[in-house]
Amino acid sequence: MTRDELYMKKALELAEIAAEQGEVPVGAIVVKRSNGEIIGRGFNRREYGRSPLTHAELVAIEEASRNLGGWRLMGCELFVTLEPCPMCTGAIINSRIERVVFGAYDKKAGSCGSVVNLFELPYNHRPLCTGGILQEQCADTLTEFFKNLRRKKNLSE
């Protein structure tokens, strides 16, 4: 198992927690590249917090910033089970995360290549990006969640 796969598995564990809580199963971790320490963890909390801002990536970035005592996350990597959206790619750029690794591609809102690649625009910081790590597992987690959601909805009608 590669280093990227190991950390993606940890993000998948967080996605499973999100699913158990009725949230779209996306998990994210922030890792210090120098020593491999996980300094931020997050999973979707939009339903619980009733906020469009509590995406897994933003929760993990916020925790990492608190743990490091500052907003600059240089030398850090973000591992997330779903390709980040425009809001999250903006936060990644602004927090100076060095590298993003994601699992499943998001053809509707993915902003690391699927719809647009915001990391290619001439912003002041351009993270490296690797997609498709444990892609099938990450995609299956989302597919299963939405299949169960539709099944529950049909039973209640």
Image (cartoon, rainbow, N blue to C red):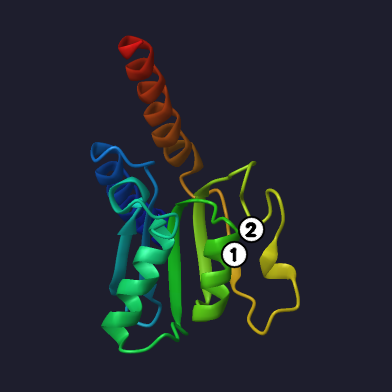
Q: Is residue 143 visible?
A: yes
Q: Dividing the picture into quarters, in which one does residue 71 lie?
A: bottom left
Camera sees residue 36: no
Residue 54 in the image, given as x and y percentages of width and height: 38, 58
Expressed as whole percent of the image width and height from the top left, the position of residue 44 reads: 36, 51
Q: In the figure, is residue 153 to the left or right of 37?
A: right
Q: Nearer the viewer, mark 1 or mark 2?
A: 2
- At x 42%, y 38%, the residue is 137
In which quadrant of the rendered image does the C terminus lie? top left
Q: CA distance from mark 1 to mark 2?
A: 7 Å
Up the image or down, 132 lies above or below 149; here it is below
Q: Which residue is mark 2?
A: 112
How many numbered discs sit on the rendered protein? 2
Residue kind at label 2, given as amino acid type: Cys
Whichever of callouts 1 and 2 sits on the residue coming sooner in the sequence is: 2
Pick the front one: 138 or 21: 21
Confirm or deny contact between disc 1 and disc 2 (CB under 8 A).
yes
Residue 61: x and y in percent read: 39, 71
Quadrant in the rendering for residue 39: bottom left
Q: Is residue 21 above or below residue 77?
A: above
- Secondary element under disc 1, as helix, strand or loop, is strand
Farthest-out residue, bottom: 69
Q: Position of residue 146 (x, y in %)?
A: 42, 28
Give the secondary structure at mark 2: loop
- Near mark 1 (Cα within 10 A), the count class, few <14, some 14-19 or many ≥20, is some
* Observer-nearest of 27 and 101: 27
Checking the image for residue 121, the label placed there is: none
Quadrant assignment, res 58 = bottom left
The kind of residue on which mark 1 rests is: Cys
Residue at which label 1 appears: 129
Q: Is residue 46 above or below residue 86?
A: above
Residue appearing at x 45%, y 29% in the figure = 143
